[in-house]
Amino acid sequence: MDVGASMIRYDAREKIIWDIFICAVVFLCSILVPYRLLSGVDPFDAFYIFVTVVFCVDIAVVFRTTLAAGRSVIDDPQIVARKYLRSWFVLDLLSALPFPVIALLAGSEGALQAALLPWLGGLRLVRLLSLLKVNSFFGRLPEFVSISGAALRLVVFGYWLTLVTHFIALGWLVIGAGNPEGEFFTRYLRALYWCITTISTIGYGDVLPDQDSHLQLVYTMVIQLFGVGMYGFVIGNISTLVANLDSAKSEYKAKSGEVLEFMRRRAIPAALQAKVRDYYAYLWETRGNVGEVDWLSELPEHLSVDLAVFLNRDVIAKVPLFRDADELFLRQVVGLLKPVVFLPGDNIMREGEHADCMYFLSSGEVEVNVKGAKIANLSSGSFFGEGALVEGGWRNASVKALGYCEGFSLSVDNFNLLRGRYPEFDKHVLEIVETRRK
């Protein structure tokens, strides 16, 4: 189904830019909202109005954005709305609510407003829950941007480290540590200085917790442990260690990373890069591996044939050309078939091109066109392209993939080899070609 004109593609360039902008707004909000609340100066000013408007617009945008469901796209507005209402909507709504305005509208009596304002002011911290959504977006961001994985991880690490450092400094002030005198900004800078020297394991010792305060001592020890952990994370490269726990996924990431880096260096067009990424993502999601053919080819011939027969048993059962064939024929056929994958919109065959193979479709659907006119749709179990091989000429039809398609190709040389060795197969092929010609 085509995405409706009123819906926004979840992977559209404009949507990715908007999501990055939301991450920046959430970052700014996470810095200023708790700072203002703690300082006691928290006006309902242009900044608060700006954040409220942006979060409200984001709610409307999400309602009109398609969803990814595996390799398909959900573009029905009603389904999108239902899924959003069951997931992030409540959090987004709480983040967008202007609590000071609610306090003003709650009652006209000054006493009531005075009682509500401190509580509703504290509820502004609900906007920090948007960081959960930011974390979810960061997890999907590598699929949409064309920058190296290492650079992206560095940006994300800096994003979270800055926020955590800020929160730790504010926590230092909340527990009453440091010099309570002076302007709030000066006290915050001192707290930030203490935080950075502590988590970086430098610890000059010029800013210390109150030795008589158990709370400050415990808080300091916790932050020191956090600093040691962060230091070990950076130096020990824990992320690489965790990635290597799943060798197949590590291989997939390494393979796709090499391909993406090659395309960036060669300035491959963005649309073509997207198709290549989609191809590897499809292989990973459907097979859990991108290099199974490599190790299969290293097995002894009889063992690789046994595995091929087992793995391709479904397509053998579906294709009428193989249905009544004997075991010896099938064992030779599966050794000659080459697996192929086609993405939506791929031209599998073009009318007028030289024929060098035929295809067997194991999953998906294709469209057959002759001189620009659609004549048929073929689905799982179908085969095509054999006519031109028999006649030794050129393609008389074009075939395009309508969705994700998997199948096998049989080269013209192997096709002729099978015809020469198995008369029954040759006879069956000629009958099918004659029938399709009529």
Image: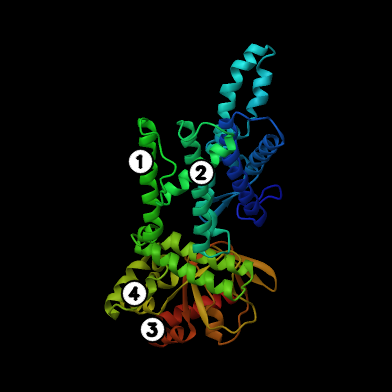
State which mark lies toward you, 1 or 4: 1
The residue that disc 1 covers is: 221
Disc marking residue 192 = 2
Question: Please, is residue 150 above or below residue 53 in the view?
Answer: below
Q: Residue 422 carries which label?
A: 3
Q: Horizontal and vertical percent for residue 152?
A: 53, 59
- Residue at 43% from the left image edge and 52% from the top image edge: 200
Give yes or no for contact between labels 3 and 2 (Cβ–Cβ under 8 Å): no
* Image depth: mark 3 or mark 2 in front: 2
Q: Is residue 94 visible?
A: yes
Give the residue pinned by disc 4: 295
Q: Could you tell me which residue is drawn at 62 percent across and 75 percent down?
A: 397
Tags 2 and 1 in contact by the CB under 8 Å rule?
A: no
Identify which amino acid the numbered label 1 is placed on: Met
Asked which secondary structure carries label 2, the reply is: helix
The CA span between labels 4 and 3 is 30 Å
Report how far apart the C-alphas of labels 3 and 2 lie in the structure.
Answer: 81 Å
Distance Cα–Cα, label 1 vs label 4: 51 Å
Residue 407 disc label: none
Mark in front: 4 vs 3: 4
